[in-house]
């Protein structure tokens, strides 16, 4: 970082502290941070994990609060016992869509073990880990029990919202969308799928048998592998070596399954019971590195792909390459740059021994965010800020920069 960009970063950090404080909410004895006050006022699962990762450098107490509040609506009974919902509606309002006033009935990428462990490494607190541990155990046991009907160690998603990348072109075929469609048609399809989930009791097998959305993806499973590894660290820290080796074993099973089924001959996701490859090119594939889900050879090929000009743009990493037919940088998740994806890819590059490229990504991300502000996502070529304003997860940049200086 040059002196000038260091100055810019310190200014940005001050603004971040203010932004996060103003997005915080205290309700019913819980504290959480709204993803973006005017657009996303409820609590989202992976957002809260990202917030905690940013807070560990600014306000570790708030980091723990964020992780505890997001687990407060974990499902306690029924077929989905153990699931942590992707949304908590603290002020109500979920009834019409989810038939539950206070929560959704699907999940989001399981990063909460990763987040807890990262917070603990900066602000150690075994008592908080001890509270979270049984909840995270139940969460991962739920994935295993309910979301892996074909027992291949890869969990399936039953709604695009579960991936976090709601309207990625990866889902178009499984969502039965035509080749060209307005964004409103995508939104309507996602909303109407929730009615179908309710009708089928959220059972992946029943949904898949009837031809509804059921996909196994690289990114979600890689994030899960990283979370299982984090659970192994947490168990060891809590003096549970037997549990710890069990979680590591499970992480390895997921890593091998991704390598064997989703990474060759080229990275792809799988759709439905017939496991039809989804070959749409997507930055989500790079997330394999985050979860240790690529062989060294597979990783090498991915890193080469990442550096090609249709991914390595002025402000990388677009979620779809800018050369792809579905590239639409103004439409969310269809080729824009998202800070959470950059954070996942950055850490994946470090994991596989590409620190120079990781540093370049951190510098480009810093340049982008300091220039365009706290936006939900960005144009990968012009750097224009897009989507919601005052988006809390932009704070992940602080974690990338802190790692750069450590
Ligand atoms: C959008 C994003 C999703 C995120 C939510 C709250 O729906 O697609 O990933 O969790 O907003 O920020």
Image (spheres, rainbow, N blue to C red):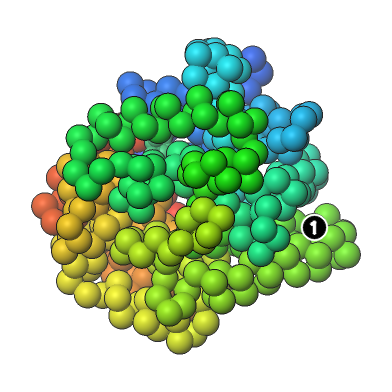
Residue 396 can be seen, yes or no: yes
State the SS at label 1. helix
Point out residue 141 in the picture as x, y percentages from the top left corner: 75, 49
Residue 313 in the image: above or below residue 119:
below
Point out residue 379 in the picture as x, y percentages from the top left corner: 18, 49
In-image side of 216 versus 137 (left or right): left
Camera-side residue of 16 and 339: 339
> Label 1 neighbourhood size at 10 Å, few (<14), some (14-19), many (20+)?
many
Determine the residue located farthest toward the front in the rendered image.
210
Mark 1 residue's CB less than 8 Å from ligand 1 = no
Picture quarter containing residue 191? top left
Residue 195 in the image: above or below residue 329:
above
Determine the residue located farthest toward the left in the rendered image.
382
Pick the quarter of the image with the N terminus: bottom left
Query: Dividing the image into four equal quarters, which quarter contains ligand 1?
Result: top left
In-image side of 50 versus 300 (left or right): right
Point out residue 85 in the picture as x, y percentages from the top left corner: 60, 33
In-image side of 276 versus 56 (left or right): left
At x 51%, y 61%, the residue is 275
At x 68%, y 53%, the residue is 149
**Count of numbered circles in the view:** 1
Point out residue 43 in the picture as x, y percentages from the top left corner: 51, 28
At x 83%, y 55%, the residue is 238
Residue 326 in the image: above or below residue 310:
above
At x 64%, y 15%, the residue is 28
The residue under label 1 is 235
Camera-side residue of 82 and 178: 178
Picture quarter containing residue 315? bottom left
């Amino acid at each position: 970082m040059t002196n000038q960009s260091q100055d810019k970063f310190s200014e940005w950090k001050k603004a971040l502290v203010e932004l996060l404080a103003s997005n915080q909410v205290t309700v019913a004895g819980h504290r959480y941070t709204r993803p973006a006050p005017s657009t996303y006022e409820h609590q989202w699962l992976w957002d809260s994990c990202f917030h905690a990762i940013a807070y560990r450098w600014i306000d570790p107490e708030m980091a723990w609060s964020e992780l505890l509040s997001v687990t407060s609506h974990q499902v306690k009974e029924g077929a989905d016992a153990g699931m942590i919902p992707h949304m908590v509606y603290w002020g109500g309002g979920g009834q019409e869509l989810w038939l539950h006033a206070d929560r959704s009935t699907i999940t989001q990428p399981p990063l909460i073990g990763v987040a807890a462990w990262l917070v603990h490494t900066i602000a150690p607190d075994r008592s908080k880990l001890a509270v979270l541990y049984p909840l995270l155990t139940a969460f991962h046991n739920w994935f295993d029990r309910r979301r892996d009907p074909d027992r291949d160690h890869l969990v399936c998603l039953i709604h695009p919202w579960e991936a976090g990348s709601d309207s990625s072109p990866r889902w178009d075929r499984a969502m039965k969308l035509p080749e060209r469609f307005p964004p409103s048609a995508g939104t309507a399809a996602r909303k109407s799928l929730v009615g179908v989930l309710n009708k089928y009791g959220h059972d992946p097998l029943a949904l898949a048998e009837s031809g509804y959305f059921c996909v196994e993806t690289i990114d979600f499973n890689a994030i899960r592998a990283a979370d299982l590894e984090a659970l192994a660290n947490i168990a060891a820290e809590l003096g549970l070596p037997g549990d710890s080796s069990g979680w590591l074993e499970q992480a390895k099973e997921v890593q091998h399954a991704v390598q064997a089924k989703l990474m060759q001959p080229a990275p792809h996701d799988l759709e439905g019971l017939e496991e039809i490859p989804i070959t749409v090119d997507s930055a989500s594939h790079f997330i394999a590195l985050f979860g240790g889900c690529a062989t060294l050879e597979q990783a090498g090929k991915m890193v080469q792909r990442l550096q090609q000009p249709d991914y390595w743009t002025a402000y990388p990493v677009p979620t779809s390459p800018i050369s792809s037919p579905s590239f639409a940088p103004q439409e969310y998740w269809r080729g824009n740059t998202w800070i959470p994806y950059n954070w996942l890819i950055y850490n994946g590059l470090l994991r596989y021994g590409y620190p120079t490229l990781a540093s370049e990504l951190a510098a480009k991300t810093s340049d982008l965010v300091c220039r365009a502000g706290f936006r939900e996502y960005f144009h990968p070529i012009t750097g224009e800020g897009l989507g919601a304003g005052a988006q809390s997860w932009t704070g992940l940049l602080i974690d990338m920069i802190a790692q750069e200086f450590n």
